[in-house]
Image (spheres, rainbow, N blue to C red):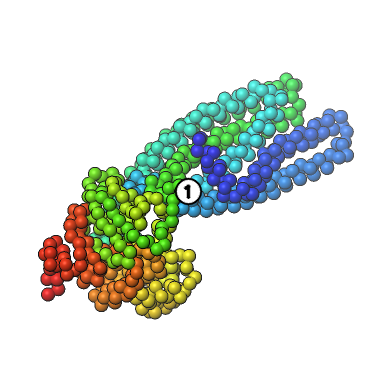
Amino acid sequence: MRNIPPVMHMVWECGPKTVIWSIVLRIALALMPLAILAVSKWLINAIVVSLAHHATVPHYFWWVVVLEFALASITAILSRGMGFCDSLLGDLYLQHISIRVIEHASQLDITAFENPDYYDRLERAKAQATDRIAMVQMMGTLIQQVLTTISLSLYIAIYSPWLLLLLIAGTIPALLGESHFAFLGYAKNFMQTPLRRKMDYLRDVGGSKEAAKELKLFGLRDFLVGSFRGMADTIFYQNVALSKRRLLAGALLSLLATAGYYSAYAVVLWETIRGEFTVAVLFVLTSAILQVSANLQQIFVNASGVADQALFLTDLLGFFAMQPTVKTRPGAISIPRPIQLGIEFRNVSFAYPGTTRLVLKDFNFHLHPGERVALIGENGQGKTTIVKLITRLYDPTEGQILVDGIDLREYDLEDLCHETGVIFQDFMRYEMSARDNIAVGRIEERDKLDRIAAAARMSLADEVIARLPGGMEQQLGRRFDGGVDLSGGEWQRMALARAYLRDAQLLILDEPTSALDPRSELEVFQRFAELTRGKMALLISHRFSTVKMADRIVVLSHGILTEQGTHAELMQQDGLYAEMFEMQAASYR
């Protein structure tokens, strides 16, 4: 239940006015049953007295009937208003929590996204963000039921406290039973999360455009369907087993609650026969006992349901409690404009979290202002890791990265990102308009079409856009209606345009032309040379025809800088670079 206060705080954050109106309406609705019973008691007494004395009813009798009708009408109107508030609050809560999940996920370290446990937690957090809307309404209903039950219970207690005790005694076992099965349900769902995530993956693979060709050619349909069915059956039988236990226990416990109600009902009948209660009191007490009995059962069911829902929110709150380790320190400074001394790796070693293998070992490297450096090496030698460290997606395990002689960790992280333009090999293909695909490089300049068009020219994306039916406003990708898909090389040009729009002091391109044909690649790099003039640039590429354009080439092997120099200098050294160059050149002869 400790999850309830933070959830209530989130509900309040999403719409304070709606919450206040919802509470006011529920309080009014909670008191209506007692008011209607009080009026009904007066009417029954008036009728009984009138019949007993063969007299007419009081002259204002029918006005009291009108009052009861008015109370019933107000109850109906309040119920409608409460339903409106609940619907509105549900939408606001869903929107608020979904936005918070997206915002918080974007703030976490890249380490989190490489951890399977994180994806399990994120999966549960996403589900809980959308599936717990019922909890918001359930809490409101619970408040209303508690107030109604208290008001009616006080009325019953005036006549006989023992009646109330009989009702409560019958419902306590039901509460304990529901709570027990709520915990079992949470444990089951927690255990099933990895399996459900695998099912989601198979569902995505089975319906994805990227996998469609191989699914057909390799005949994978039966394999995917069989794997999915096996997992689904496992979850189904686990759910059925728990549901059967809950059904049997719930039926037995509900009998106790029913016994409590009829015991109280029998006491009222006995006291009426003895003459202790009037007919009006009999009517009111039996009605109140019926409502209290029903409400008590619903209170315990809803309280158990809220506890059940709140238990599931443990992962959502735990997700929000996750904090990044790579973040801006208090008192952080801005990146120099311009950078005067460059960026230096000083005795840097790095191992990815959860591993002991050093990807970089005592790495020393200096990128000077205005210098274009190409990083060369076989796969897994640390090239992309250098990019991740220089952009502070990770911090070094040992050593320092300095910008103008100051540790990178002393700078404002957001400002560092602002002054860095990066295009990774696995760049994003945003299924948005062509303009927005480029604008994400500097999203605050989304409305500056001249800047976006210039970036498109630099990357040759303007040729792609010219062929699109909708031009800059053309929807890209096949996910949405009217979308046009692009080839790998065309998508890559769009990604390059983002880097050019970024216009940052440091430009990093990780395999930026891997999907381009040789002619397009040459044109891109001719423009790349113009674009990076006066800027620092890091280029990672396996195509030696492009790295020859760099001012300096750095060769990595097993996380160590083994060679550096111009193309001509490295060829003269006849080392690893020359060997790799000759191997690639031989394949073109």
Residue 534 place in picture, x, y as percent: 34, 69
For the C terminus, the quadrant is: bottom left
- Camera-side residue of 289 and 347: 347
Residue 572 place in picture, x, y as percent: 12, 67
Q: Is residue 125 visible?
A: no
Q: Is residue 527 visible?
A: yes
Determine which quarter of the picture holds residue 404: bottom left
Residue 94 place in picture, x, y as percent: 52, 51
Name the residue at 70% across, 38% down: 31
**Residue that carries the numbered disc 1 in the rendered image:** 129
Name the residue at 42% across, 75% down: 453
Name the residue at 37% across, 67% down: 499
Name the residue at 48% across, 51% down: 100
Q: Name the element at disc 1.
A: helix
- Above or below 348: residue 156: above
Residue 215 place in picture, x, y as percent: 27, 61
Q: How many numbered tags mark residues here?
A: 1
Determine which quarter of the picture holds residue 42: top right
Q: Residues within 10 Å of mark 1 (few under 14, many from 20)?
A: many
